[in-house]
Amino acid sequence: METNEACRAANIESPLSNHMQEAEGAEATVAPERSNIEICLRVRPVPDPMEGIHVDKDERTVRFIVPRSINQGLTNNQREAYQFTFNKLFPANSTQEEVFDGVARDVVLESLEGINGTVFAYGQTGSGKTFTITGGSERYEDRGIIPRAISLIFSTIAKRTNTTYMVQVSYLEIFNEAGYDLLDEEREVRSLEELPRVHVMEDENGTLHTRNLSLHRAATEEDALNLVRMAARFAHGFVWLEIPEGTFSTCD
């Protein structure tokens, strides 16, 4: 079984701190403290489920059993069980819609009210981050968080006839601690390293600003999706949808 973590952040006031507490029987539990950051776990389906891993959707926990090894008659006194608790847990049979509704829907809607929000996927190679964030290409229901977020933004603002919105899209790739603008239109490039480098700067108030990151206006849902497809010629990235008084971003 492989796992893929998706994290949500909105109006962050304090950093999340996880702490380990030892329980009886050499067990350990990791539980997130109350925070504006939610830690969600999505379990990737695998052909052969592994023994010793127990997923409890109702309790939002994953429990790992690691039998103690005996070497030359000596018992290893290492912990035998580890249990991790998350804000939300999506088992292997979860749909893309269920993941989006549970992780990103509220963040998107809050961004339209002026509250910045971020959703990003974290996990090892092959754990399903790209599928969760971008989605599959064969079936409409396999759309990931980015296209679903774009659709929700435009469908919501279309109903608010008394308010005028402007949506702008940026697409930033972070590779080896360097940022690149994947939507640069000023030159023909063949590799990521040929793209403009994006620099992040902090002002005297502690606010972060980006330099060399282009903004592209998207008047329709299709405009925004085309920009995302254009940037997808390169690898994984950080999509930034900017709406006056609020932003929504995703990272893969």
Image (spheres, rainbow, N blue to C red):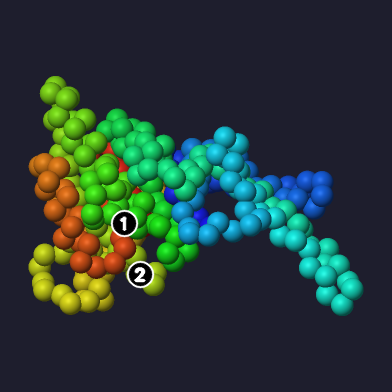
Q: Looking at this view, name the residue that lies furthest to the front.
A: 48
Q: Nearer the viewer, residue 226 or 92?
A: 92
Residue 106 x, y percent position in the rendering: 36, 33
Location of residue 243 (image quadrant): top left
Q: How many marks?
A: 2
Could you say whether the residue bearing mark 2 is in a helix, strand or loop? strand
The numbered mark, 2 or 1, whose residue comes first in the sequence reads 2
Quarter of the image that includes the C terminus = bottom left
Could you say whether the residue bearing mark 1 is in a helix, strand or loop? strand
Q: Is residue 174 left or right of residue 69?
A: left
Q: Looking at this view, name the residue that lies furthest to the top.
A: 162
- Name the amino acid, label 2: Phe
**Residue 209 makes an appearance in the image:** no
Location of residue 122 (image quadrant): bottom left
Q: Which residue is mark 2?
A: 175
Residue 230 x, y percent position in the rendering: 16, 60
Residue 180 x, y percent position in the rendering: 27, 67
- Name the amino acid, label 1: Phe
Q: What is the C-alpha distance between the residues marked 2 and 1? A: 11 Å
In percent of the image, x 71 and y 60: which residue is there? 66
Q: Which residue is mark 1?
A: 238
In percent of the image, x 16 and y 25: which residue is there? 159
**Residue 112 makes an appearance in the image:** yes
Q: Is residue 189 above or below residue 165?
A: below
Q: Residues within 10 Å of mark 1 (few under 14, many from 20)?
A: many
Q: Is residue 43 left or right of residue 78?
A: left
In percent of the image, x 32 and y 46: which residue is there? 145
